[in-house]
Amino acid sequence: MGAQVIQSGAMTGLQQELGLLKATFEERLRQVMGEADPADLLQSAMREAALGAGKRMRPLLMMLLARDLGCHPAGMLDAACAVELVHAASLILDDMPCMDDAMLRRGRPTIHVRFGEDVAILAAISLLSRAFGLVASAPGVPADARARMSSTLANAIGTKGLAMGQYQDLRAGRDQRSTDDIAVTNELKTGMLFDVAVNMATVIAESGDSVVLPLKRFARAAGQAFQIRDDLQDGPGNDSAVTGKDVGLDAGKATIVLTLGVEEAQRQLAFLVQESDRHLVGALGEQAATRLFIRALFADKAAPVSAPRVAPVAVRGAAFVTG
Ligand code: GRG
């Protein structure tokens, strides 16, 4: 059964389930971030970055994957919070004047605009620290699984992951680059947290290679798709009142959208979403809730136009640490 014939009843069921998972996640994240203390600027900046109105795509993906792999989603809660905190730290840093110099994020002033650059940097570091603390002490998860998850997260943040992807984006992003080179950057800065989500879910579920390998391929395709989706939101025709963030910051940068044009980028995106679905079916079967989630995530941007006209964006996974 292709993604296009998934019944709408299944979609309604998913929406209900997602609502419950999201509420459970938000409650745990609020607990983790502690009571508000307006006198403590560092804690306020951390809370603002973590508790702002994000889509929570990564934690929801992790919890749904856990469920599709036969585990209780609650077992993923602290690991899911950890990944969201790493994501929040990356957004703080990405928005700073020395990087993208953004003013608006999730419909509100960016963290450095509101709290100052000094507090923003310290908040990002403290969120990373809290993330590792959560993984190291995740309740109900065996010690060796916690150690593997910590290692996965550590690898994903540094020179084989987000930091390197961001470095390439900032320092080579203004040069003319091949779509393959841009894809590697996107894999590092965006795809890596999809890979972490898959790694953590499969570690907790103790999955074998027949599940892990197709899920890693899924992570690569979905990560590429997600970055194209994000780039499409930066271009003409978007309104920051709708997207909640500055529009036009990518002008002059080498992105898939600016290199191939909006229409071809949409075709590439649709292709990558199909690829993601194919790998999800291979790993989890046709009835997996994760399939519906991914389909819904991209529904607004992956209009099924036609097949890509240039070679599809590489989904090589060359940059990933494992698999
Ligand atoms: C040390 C964690 C760390 C990072 C240093 C700054 C940096 C290196 C990396 C930046 C990576 C980055 C921001 C990539 C873009 C990923 C992306 C598409 C973000 C948008 O994610 P959404 O749409 O945002 O899920 P919401 O607001 O919904 O959570």
Image (cartoon, rainbow, N blue to C red):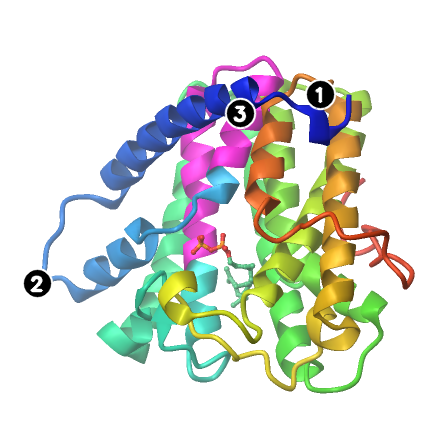
Disc 1 to disc 3: CB gap under 8 Å: no
Residue drawn at (54%, 40%) of the image: 150
The nearer-to-camera label among 1 and 2 is: 1
Residue labelled with disc 3: 11
Q: Dot 1 surroundings within 10 Å: few (below 14), some, or many (20 or more)?
A: some
Q: Please say if 30 is above or below 1.
A: below
Q: Please say if 173 is above or below 312.
A: below
Name the side, left or right, on which 211 lies relative to 83. Answer: right
Q: Secondary structure at mark 1?
A: helix
Going from N to C along the chain, the mark reached first, 1 or 3, is 3
Q: Please say if 142 is above or below 280.
A: above
Q: CA distance from mark 2 to mark 3?
A: 44 Å
Q: Secondary structure at mark 2?
A: loop
Q: CA distance from mark 1 to mark 2?
A: 48 Å
Magenta range is: 60-88
Q: Amino acid at mark 2?
A: Ala
The nearer-to-camera label among 2 and 3 is: 3
Q: Amino acid at mark 3?
A: Met
Q: Is mark 3 within 8 Å of ligand 1?
A: no
Q: Is mark 2 within 8 Å of ligand 1?
A: no
Q: Secondary structure at mark 3?
A: helix
**Circle on res. 39:** 2
| Main secondary-structure element of the magenta-colored stretch | helix
